[in-house]
Amino acid sequence: MQGNNTVEKKTSKKSTVKDKVEDKVKDKVNDKVNEEAVVSSGTDGVESTESAESAAERSQDKYQTTEEKKERPTRSRRFFIGMDKFGDLFYLNILFILTSIPIITIGASFTALYTVTNKMVDDDEPPVKDCYFKAFKENFKQATILWIIDLIIFYLMYLQYQYVIMYKTDAAKMLFVALGFEFIFMAFAVPLQFPLVARYINTTGKMFLNSLILSLANFTVWFRMFFLWTFPVMIFYVNPKIMYYIWFLWLLIMIAVTAYACSLFLKKFYAKLEKPKE
């Protein structure tokens, strides 16, 4: 990670079902080849070799065909996969809302939310409830500290803004300029905070610093995430009536959908960070 700060990726148990199936198929292929080779061993040696090679080729072609079929699910299969993911996002959104009610726990809720959506993007989908609450508990302390720091800074910015609009002095003008820099600072520092906590192990101070540095170094990723999370606010500012009609969607599923979209952008970002240096 940039800024000479060392990080350690959080490990998790990956699903090995697909690997086991592939190993079983390969074992069956090898067994079939060996059986055909043994049957033909009584004949001429050249014929035996050709028989074994042809059997291996046929079996390998059959194996490849089977793999291609697995990689290309039917339309109905894709439909049910999509509906299953939709249900997981709906459930995940409800968990996020419930755990964010105390306000102080929003940081831990966002971290748990990103933990689950990151796994969903990687096609490693454990039980949503178990994964969510495990991440919530493991990252509660660090995520809550970061969230409290953010709240304090935002509250101080709010007080500055109130002073600026109440007084028209030179000091208020200078404070307004400082407020602009503070907004830019927090706009870059916040979006990557909880995705980093969800993925890596580091000190709280370095998490805050790294989120700022990595946002500046990966502007495209930062901008997409910033836009997705601030878009509803912009809609409300432009036309409050729109939010009046769609606010319930955010309570039901849109928060989880937004986090899932961010995880899609973060996939290459994580791969870039974790790529070993040559």
Image: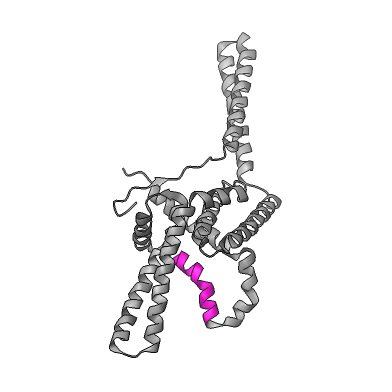
Q: Is residue 233 magenta?
A: yes
Q: Is 233 above or below relative to 19? A: below
| Front-most of residues 156 and 71 | 156
Residue occupying the point 60% across, 37% down: 17
- At 51% from the left and 72% from the top, the residue drawn is 231
Nearest to the observer: residue 87 or residue 67: 87
Which residue shows up at 35% across the image and 77% down it? 180
Image quadrant where one finds the C terminus: top left
Whether residue 191 is visible: no
* Main secondary structure of the magenta stretch: helix
Identity of the residue furthest to the right in this view: 76
Which residues are the magenta region? 223-237
The spot of residue 109 in percent (x, y) is: 53, 58
Q: In the figure, 134 relative to 227: above or below? A: above
Give how far across and how far down residue 44 sits, in percent: 59, 10
Left/right of residue 214 with respect to residue 112 in the rendered view: left
